[in-house]
Structure formats: C-alpha cells, structure tokens
Image: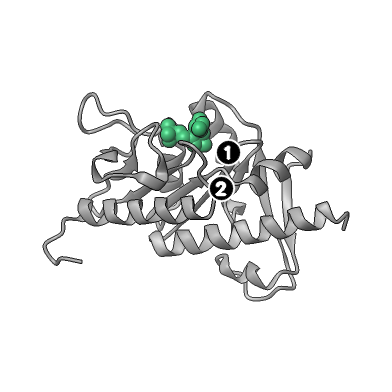
Amino acid sequence: MSETMTDFARATQDILVAGQRMDARGWVPATAGNISRRLPDGRIAITRSGCHKGFLQAADVITVDEAGKPHRSGDKPSAETLLHCQIYQQDPTAGAVLHGHSVAATVLSMIEKGPALHLADYEVLKVFEGQTTHETSVPVPLFENDQDIARLAQVVAPSFGSMAAGYIIRGHGVYVWGKDMPTALARLEGLEFLLACLLERRKLGL
Ligand SMILES: CSC[C@@H](O)[C@@H](O)C(=O)COP(=O)(O)O
Ligand SMILES: [Zn+2]
C-alpha cells in the first residue's frame, strides 16, 4: 500500500476488500449489506446505497458526518447509515462496521421468537471481546425489522452495553463491528461460523 494514500483511500480499500470477502462467503446477496470505516478526523466512509458489495468500485464509497449527512450533496449513502453512526457513537473504539444478510442469521432469527440467540460452549466464542473460554454463553440480541431506520436505532440503543458479538435484525441480518476492519471481519466470520453451527444443530433437531 502506498505511503501517500490518504486516510479515505485506505478506508475505501478496506471496504472494497471486505465487500469481496463477504460476497465470497455468500453473506451479501444481490445488493444486500453495507460497510463503513471511521476516519481519524471523525468522518465515516460508507458504501453508497444499492451497490453490490462484491463488485464495489472506489466511487461507491462516500463520506458522511457523525449524524449520517453526506459531505457532498446528491450522494446517497446506505439506507442503514444511521445504524453505523449509532455504533460509532456508542463505541468510541469502533473503527469499522459490517452488515450482512447471511442465510443462517436470517433463518435463525425468524425461527427464534425470544429476544436473543444464545451461543454457548463453542471454542470460537473467544473471537469476541472479553471471552477467554468456551465455558460461557454469549447472547446475540434480536430486534424486530423496521424500514424506519431511525426508529430501529432507538430500539437497539438500550442494549449496547451487553453486545459482545453484535446484534441481529430479525429476518434481515447481522451488525458487527471492531476497532479496525480486520477485527470487524474476524468477528463477523466468528459470528457467522457460530450461527451456521446453530442452524446445523437445529436441522439435526439437537
Ligand atoms: C437487497 S435489499 C437490502 C436492503 O434493503 C438493506 O437491508 C441493505 O442491507 C442494503 O441497503 P443499502 O442501502 O444498499 O446499504
Ligand atoms: Zn440490510
């Protein structure tokens, strides 16, 4: 990577690579999903609305302010920009946010009628902040889907203190974040692996 790259160019590169990775794993069908990176000056680099995340071009990444307002008039950021802004506001250490629509997250969240999925006894739980053993249970909160993203953000807000592994919007997808893009991607991979395990077990009736 060139030393003369700007923070925005570096963030754009991270977002393009993350989109390809998520697409390769089947987590962003059609134009689903959105991806962002916080820049050192507080701006947020985020995907434009409606792009296929596996085929992102540099021009598909734009910047918004902390309230989700695009810096360039006419730019249309992700429809779910407010959920990204909320995560950056709630967690000052967050540097990257990933949202995907995997089959496992979608199906499990529709089967489970309770307020959370519980991931217990898996070694991979250690991918999440503060987890040092498999002998634990990590809840992943479930929230009802809502096309009004500001209203959805209000429903999510009270649960932020207790989200080691991110959260799931029912019948929709996951939100995961980390201090930087590699950390966010590792957490997403960990969470998706665990959701896939849970789905397999449900299929087996276990
Ligand atoms: C393919 S429908 C998915 C969208 O409605 C939405 O949930 C989504 O994840 C992508 O929206 P976007 O505005 O492109 O960021
Ligand atoms: Zn979505």
Is the CB atom of the residue marked by disc 2 within 8 angstroms of ligand 2's nearest atom?
no
Asked if one can make out residue 42 in the rendered structure from this viewpoint, the answer is: yes
- In the rendered view, tell whether residue 179 sits above or below residue 151: below
Within 10 Å of the Cα at label 2, are there few (<14), some (14-19), or many (20+) other Cα atoms?
Answer: some
Q: Residue 157's image quarter?
A: top right
Say which amino acid is labelled 1: Val
Circle 1: element type: helix
Residue designated by label 1: 156
Whether label 2 touches label 1, CB < 8 Å: yes
Q: Which residue is drawn at 14% across and 67% down?
A: 3
Q: Which residue is drawn at 36% across and 56% down?
A: 17
Give the left or right position of residue 89, taking residue 104 as reference. left
Q: Which mark is residue 104?
A: none
Q: Where is residue 51 in the image (x, y as percent from the top left)?
A: 38, 36
Say which amino acid is labelled 2: Phe
Within 10 Å of the Cα at label 1, are there few (<14), some (14-19), or many (20+) other Cα atoms?
Answer: some
Give the left or right position of residue 4, taking residue 1 as reference. left
What's the CA distance linking mark 2 and mark 1? 7 Å
Residue designated by label 2: 160
Nearer to me, 39 or 98: 98
